[in-house]
């Protein structure tokens, strides 16, 4: 059986402040970027540790996609919006 680790770009939006520390510490999570109530990150391998980091926080949006070549880091055409790399800005 092929045990290749899957890589996903994940974006999640919360009702209130996101649990940035829990997300950043979850196994397989890297490249964490915070933009107000939204957190974007890269998840390699099982997504379960990432989902466990969300426990107890109200999520109002979640997207997951595979990174694509010739696109911005979120797999979408670049549209000029800046991302904040702040802890909690909003």
Image: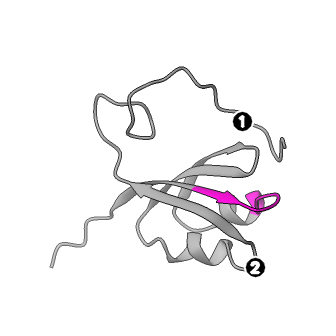
Q: Nearer the viewer, residue 60 or 32?
A: 60
Q: Per the image, is 79 magenta?
A: no
Q: Seen in the image, is 22 located left or right of residue 26?
A: right
The spot of residue 87 in percent (x, y) is: 81, 45
The spot of residue 61 in percent (x, y) is: 59, 61
The spot of residue 34 in percent (x, y) is: 70, 45
How many neighbours does mark 2 have within 10 angstroms: few (below 14), some (14-19), or many (20 or more)? few
Q: Secondary structure at mark 2?
A: loop
Q: Which residues are magenta?
A: 12-21
Q: Quadrant of the N terminus?
A: bottom left
**What label sits on residue 56 in the rendered view?**
2
Q: Residue 22 appears in which quarter of the rendering? A: bottom right
Q: Seen in the image, is 86 located left or right of residue 81?
A: right
For the point 72% across and 71% down, the residue is 58
**What label sits on residue 85 in the rendered view?**
1
For the point 51% across and 77% down, the residue is 48
The spot of residue 84 in percent (x, y) is: 71, 33
Q: Nearer the viewer, residue 47 or 5?
A: 47
Q: Earlier in the sequence, mark 1 or mark 2?
A: 2
**What label sits on residue 74 in the rendered view?**
none
For the point 63% across and 25% down, the residue is 82
Q: Mark 1 or mark 2: which is in front? A: 2
């Amino acid at each position: 059986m092929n045990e290749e680790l899957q890589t996903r770009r994940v974006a999640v939006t919360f009702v209130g402040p996101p649990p940035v520390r829990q997300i950043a510490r979850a196994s397989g999570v890297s490249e964490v970027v915070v933009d107000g109530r939204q957190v974007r990150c890269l998840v390699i391998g099982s997504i379960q540790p990432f989902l466990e980091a969300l426990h107890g926080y109200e999520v109002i949006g979640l997207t997951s996609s595979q990174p694509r070549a010739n696109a911005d880091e979120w797999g979408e055409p670049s549209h000029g919006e800046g991302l904040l790399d702040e802890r909690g800005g909003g």
